[in-house]
Image (cartoon, helix red, strand yellow):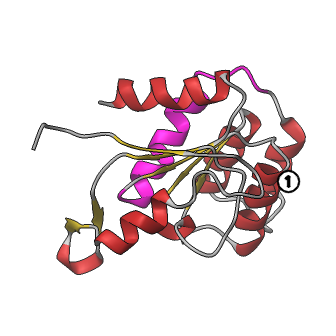
Amino acid sequence: MADDLHRVALETITIGKQAIIFLPSKSSAEKTAEEIAKKTAFFLPELGQEILTAVSTPTSQCRRLSHCVKKGIAFHHSGLTSKQKDTIEESFKAGKIRIICSTPTLAAGLSLPVFRVIIKSLKRYTGRWGMDWIPVLEYLQMAGRAGRPEYESYGEAITIAKSDA
């Protein structure tokens, strides 16, 4: 399944488009971004430095994010600073970042140049209740990030299923 996810993400880059991959947790967003970043040929050192200087003392998470954005990939979730989120979103709009691996934090409110939305799981982490099915409205919000009329003539929403069920 991870191979399918990586293949679809890298194919999006190959056709010159951008994608958001929605993942069920912060840790899975970070891990997926790191895995995909290992497979790209981008080199954006100035962008990596901008992520590091967004905080006075970079944490290990900041360094991990910096490494990913140097490779044109980012992760996005509630654990990032506002400045880091803004840098990621603006760099995505500018076409420097090609793939954002995100929790549902990017599901509503932003219009970004997303051709393809890839949803890895129809479940997500809900705090004290653990993993739970995403509501239909949330699925529609995530899928609706693809093909925004100001950026694309159409978009694609792909869900990676674990089983036929």
Q: Nearer the viewer, residue 110 or 28?
A: 110
**Residue 30 lies in the magenta stretch:** yes
Q: Residue at x 68, y 71 (%)?
A: 81
The number of numbered badges drawn on the structure is: 1
Q: Outermost residue toward the right?
A: 46
Quarter in which the N terminus is drawn: top left
Q: What residue is at 85 percent from the left and 36 percent from the top?
A: 45
In the rendered view of the protein, which quadrant contains the C terminus?
top left
Determine if residue 103 is in view: no
Residues in magenta? 24-42
Would you say residue 74 is visible in this rendering?
A: yes
Task: Classify residue 122 as left or right of residue 110.
Answer: left
According to the picture, the residue beneath numbered tag 1 turns out to be 50
Farthest residue in the left direction?
165
- Where in the figure is residue 152, as x and y percent of width and height? 71, 47
Q: Nearer the viewer, residue 64 or 68?
A: 68
Mark 1: few/some/many CA within 10 Å (<14, 14-19, 20+)? some
Q: Kindly report the secondary structure that dominates the magenta region of the rendered protein.
A: helix
Residue 53 x/y as whole percent: 84, 59
